[in-house]
Image (cartoon, grey):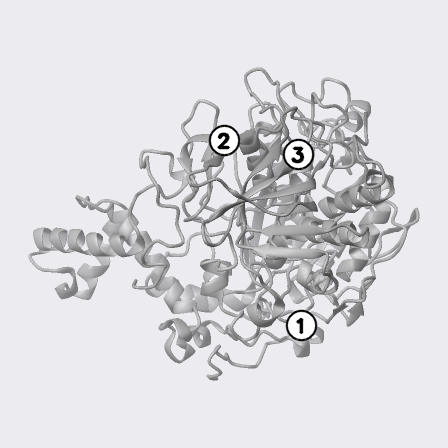
Amino acid sequence: MELPYGHGAFFYLQGPFHPESPATLGYQLRYTPREIYRLGIEDANAASRENHGREFARLDPSSQEQFLASMEEGALKFPTIPAALLFAQLLENTREGYFSDPIHGGNRNMVAWNWIGFPGARADFTDWIDQAGTEYPYGPVSIGGTKA
Amino acid sequence: MTTPRRLKPVDAVIIGYGWTGAILAKTLTDAGLHVVALERGPARDTSPDFEYPRIADELRHGIRGELWQPLAAETVTVRHSVNDTAVPYRKYGSFVLGNGVGGAGVHWNGMLWRASPEDFRFRSHIEERYDKHFIPSEMTIQDYPVSFEELEPHFDHFEKVCGVSGTAGNLRGTIRPHGNPFEGPRSDDYPTPPLPAIYAAQLFEKASAQLGYRSFPVPAANSSVAFTNPYGVRLGPCNLCGYCERFGCFLYSKASPQTTILPILANRSSLSVRTGAYVTRIQQDASKKRATGVLYIDENGQELEQPADLVILSAFQMHNVRLLLLSGIGAPYDPSSGQGVVGKNYAYQMVAATSAFFGEDVHINPFIGAGAAGMRAIDEFNSDHYDHSKLGFVGGAVIMAGATGGRPIEQMLLPPDTSRWGRSWKEAVRKHYRHSAPVTVQGSVMSYRDRYLSLDPTYKDKHGVPLLRITFDWHDNEYRMAAYAASKMEEIVREMHPQSQATLMFKPGNHYDTRIYQSTHTTGGAIMGSSPSSSVINRYSQSWDLPNLFVYGASAFPQNVGYNPTGLLAGLAYFSAEKLKSTYLRSPGPLVS
């Protein structure tokens, strides 16, 4: 979140803002990703304390899952950041971290790529052009040159 | 800002150094002109910008879009109808805009289609085949002022420039096996043979044949062999790396301006390429009969004036229209009266996709794929290749199979009832990733009286210049076309015998959704036509208002087709370039009176 992405460098963030616009016209709030997290986590912890008497991190796993599900559905109302927006941001970045090259800090030892069978940055399938339909046998490689 | 510094006049200035900018830079410098090309993005080349392994980074390029136009500096606004307030396209979704040398020609897939012969006289063709009332009154489709036959040599040339791999379906009028039988007659075969079908495309081929359809390789500007193009530039064979669309090609296989034309221009002293040059206006003389040059802001924020005898507007479709509007060239289109031309007939494409989910014994290997090579398609339901008399719509779609890669953030296919997260999601990605395949419909969108481009009254770019505003939503014709094409697609997928299948498509009641990537094939707004009252440019891409201004790109299309636009817009550019060389440069003036 200290990189340009976190600071909103990839989004047009000039006003005026019309959050009441149809959802089909996309994101219409003023917040950068890091603001969504910073303000949203505060909102979420306040809601967790109110509903469960403690912060989110200290809930048991099944209460955490329920809490996340009610954020996703928008059943929880947060004062600053819409709960569904915080959840969507969290899910999007989690998925990105899980599936992207380890160079970005997630997917350690290419565990996610091994899990699904994606060969990562291999990017050369000349040897498989005439073997369509047979199982690809090689594991992933990363941009940094590691193999798993 | 202080008075712009006036630079030394040149013979021609080119705005936007992508495909058509490169084509015109070559044409004009061949003819001995001194040319300045202004590109607002950075300089980019295969090395170092697209080098392996750094390019094989889905997050950086496929998701964050480091090769795309940074929206923070400039975007567009969108609204669904003329009475709505438009809001900015703040994050990438529906389409992605190119940036830098090579433009969208760097990050495209390389699907290099020609349009069908009837697409060039679409209104006349429909009125003749059906009747005058077949076209709804709000549909403002027009004929091109140029025919397939006139463009054919230029399509052929561009295919050779790009080393396109494919199989001819109609060679000088003879229908040939394994090619597209619906294409217009071509003077020559593709310059390189097609790559073998990837597995998903093989399943599609078999299923299509079972149903009586004639599938063929998607024409691919992904060269299949080492190839030297007519300019002496070498392309290398595609290795199906899976990092094509949204990426630059590290193998010199995907045709881009960098891999086909720019190498021969690099050392021309008559050509100067200035990057980081953001054009804000095309200037006119007091009589408004002549362009005198352009104003631009350089990388240091300094405003400069570049005088030129000839102005080539070759930016992306939307940017062409925005610059015409900002410059006050031509009458802006007014949807209430239907008068005016600049911004008129904005169109898009209507897409749908069916995901096929196979058992774990079917090895799709989705990560093996190129932008176009290895894919297969059918063209039975595109354009007017089939009888529409009882269907209640015009237009159609190409139906294509085979993935452009299996990059897991963007291209993971999951059954619609899958949880979006948690343990069951994790199980589902493991179960389906290697065993699922997409088939897609890419359909035409007609033009309409109430769908257009204009300047936004509120939102500005980082320099304080108004953004372009898109007014667009679907019409019934397109919902019907998509439903029909999708029903054919689903029938083929059933014949591929997956365990299950699921279709994503837009139905009546679904508004244009800018959050979902659909297509970057936006068209119109500076359309080509036979009269100044109905178009911005003539058949030679020359402005009706300023004869020394030429406008290139998909902004010229009077309505959209079901094919990818690059082949068509490059054909129009080469057709114009030939006329510039043979006539205009000898005797500048209107080429059509």
Tag 1: residue type? Asn
Query: B421 or B443: nearer the eye?
Result: B443
Tag 3: residue type? Ala
Query: B397 or B525: nearer the eye?
Result: B525
Residue B106 position by quadrant? bottom right
As drawn, B417 above or below B192: above
Tag 2: residue type? Leu
- The answer for how far apart the CA atoms under marks 1 and 3 are is 46 Å
- The answer for how far apart the CA atoms under marks 2 and 3 are is 21 Å
Point out the residue furthest to the top here: B337
Q: Which mark is residue B190?
A: none
Q: Position of residue B220 (x, y in %)?
A: 72, 59
Quarter of the image with the C terminus of chain B is top right
Q: Which mark is residue B239?
A: 1
Total marks drawn? 3
Q: Chain of mark 3?
A: B
Pointer 1 and pointer 3: residues touching (CB < 8 Å)? no
Q: Chain of mark 1?
A: B
As drawn, A138 above or below B255: below
Q: Residues within 10 Å of mark 3 (few under 14, many from 20)?
A: many
As drawn, B513 above or below B590: below
In the picture of the structure, the residue carrying the numbered disc 3 is: B291
Q: Which mark is residue B455?
A: 2
- Relative side of B396 to A115, left or right: right
Q: Residues within 10 Å of mark 1 (few under 14, many from 20)?
A: many
Question: Residue drawn 42% across and 48% down?
Answer: B91
